[in-house]
Amino acid sequence: MNQTLNSYTFVPDHFDPSSFDSIQPLLTQLQDRPLQSADDLQAWLADMSNLLEAVYEYGSRANINNACHTDDEAIEKVYLDFVQNVQPKLKPVFFELQKKYMACEHRAALGDGRYAVLEREWRVDVETFREDNVALETEQTVLFNKYSKLCGAMMVQFEGETLTLQQLTRYQEDTDRDTRERAWRLGTGRRLEDRELIDNIFQTLVDQRTQMASNAGFEDYRAYKWQRKYRFDYTPEDCLTFGDAVAQRVLPTLKTLDTQRREALGLDRLRPWDTAVDVKGRGPLKPFDEKDIQGFVDTTRRVFERVSPVLAEQFGRMKMGDNLDLDSRKGKRPGGFQSSLEKSKQPFIFMNAAGQQRDVETLLHEAGHAFHYMDSTAEPLVFLRHAPLEFCEVASMSMELLGMDHFVEYYGNAEDAARAKRVHLEGTLRILPWIATIDGFQHWLYTHEGHSADQRTSAWLDLLDRFGTGEVDWSGLEDARAAMWHRQLHLFGVPFYYIEYGIAQLGALGVWLNYKRDADKALSDLTKAFALGGGAPLPALFETAGVPFRFDAETLGPLIDAIDEELAALPE
């Protein structure tokens, strides 16, 4: 049977995935093919995978190009044509193929646990698919593209330069408080210029998502999305338990850190522009020259060489242009991501580097996704190649933590390397209440149907209060605080995708502690989990990686204690 999985003859050499007219005959062949044995079924899955690899890679490249050049109308036209004229036609046919698989009497004869995972997911797809929702999904993709264009066009003039808002954030580390405040107010003011437009986009998204849930017969969008995201192994209540754990175990440490920051800066009160500057008055950390992106890449490879020669070799395969677009520039979508090119089995990393320590963390993070993907490509079926996002983020966050002991490669001196490690560890603590805030906001949004914009803002502010330390003074800046969530692109483009970061952060901290005890075993376990791709349930992936799949206060406590100990050992 297995030899059929390595057959790549189904898709013609000159296949054009930009047109559904080219895709449809192959889909029809798959629909019409009789499945009279387990061998037939396995070969059929291999051919379907072969076809989808080509289509998915084309769509990924269209998205990458559009993200890199949001101001290029020709590129946008190609992307939107795929989104509006290929994806919507593909989805109902793929649904029919899933039904064909679920109806096949030979499924049980495949005899591989990987297929049990596939069957569990496809059963959900078959049960929740509604053709009316295809058009709504397309409209939401177009709306997210509109949001991305708005954000990509946000430019400001500061200190004689035209800057993206990502580039402007580097001034938050400036030792001159007036400069920090001016930069902060300028960037925030620019975002608020588009507040009404972004609010309107989001309201439409919420309305459409509510309609999708209703179309599929669910009580609300949360219940619908829980199934669509294959969240078989934890519940909404578990996510709220995570929030409780963060409030109990993380906020006390952060409150202490904020108080120490205020006292060290000699301030009566912290303001939003006081949260990133070095408390000893040292200049901003400068890990690399933003104009020398290749140098940044080369240094990152040296970091991975220190962690593992295998990781360094994998990272060294990625080349500028082919696999990397890292600089920040006008017309580029904000944020960062790793995209999988399924046919060529290559990763692609997108980010907006501006010469900051956060850029180091972002590249290490996205490289973790790339390593995960590279190790999973031995899985022949594209449907089983990708792990659940909760584990994908373990891969990325682990690389941030494993790389932080080698920051000297970027800075050339122990003092700045220790500063950068402190920044990262404190950032690890600070992201947890932000995750709880964003996740809690989504739970509220989609279980309060028909809420008003004012009610939405009130719910957001309540969450900020709950998961804040109370040490930062926002008086006079109420509009900026109320609209902070506009910056979180996940809310617009990938709803309910955020708790994954919290679950994964706990897993990554577990990997880090394992690495400190036995580096070879920790990396071996992690690589074994990577190679499973999506062929095992979420708890099994965590177990294979050597970490527990729990996210309550009992699990979180020892991890926070370990960070506290690490911080205490670092020089100020």
Image: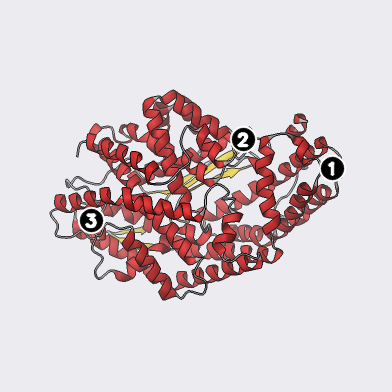
| Residue at image location 33% in from the left, 71% down from the top | 479
Residue beneath disc 1: 35
Image coordinates for residue 476, horizontal then vertical, percent: 25, 71
* Quadrant of residue 135 within the rendered picture: bottom right
Question: Mark 2 — residue?
Answer: 377
Which amino acid type is marked by label 1?
A: Leu
Instruction: Find residue 248 and name its label.
Output: none
Quarter of the image containing the C terminus? top left
Residue at image mark 3: 274
Question: Comparing marks 1 and 3, which lies closer to the viewer?
Answer: 1
The x, y position of residue 419, in whole percent, is 25, 40
Q: Amino acid at mark 2?
A: Thr
Q: Position of residue 284 (x, y in %)?
A: 25, 46
Q: Secondary structure at mark 3?
A: helix
Q: Quadrant location of the N terminus?
A: top right
Q: Residue at x 34, y 39 (%)?
A: 558
Mark 2 and mark 1 lie on one chain; the one further toward the N terminus is 1
Mark 1 or mark 3, which has the lower sequence index? 1
Eye-nearest disc, 2 or 1: 1
Residue 27, can we see it? yes
Three-letter amino acid code at the position of disc 3: Asp
Q: Are marks 1 and 3 in contact (CB under 8 Å)?
A: no
Mark 2 or mark 3: name the one nearer the start of the chain: 3
Q: Is residue 569 left or right of residue 384?
A: left
Foreground of the two, 417 or 275? 275
- Position of 60 with respect to 406 (left or right) is right
Q: CA distance from mark 1 to mark 3?
A: 65 Å
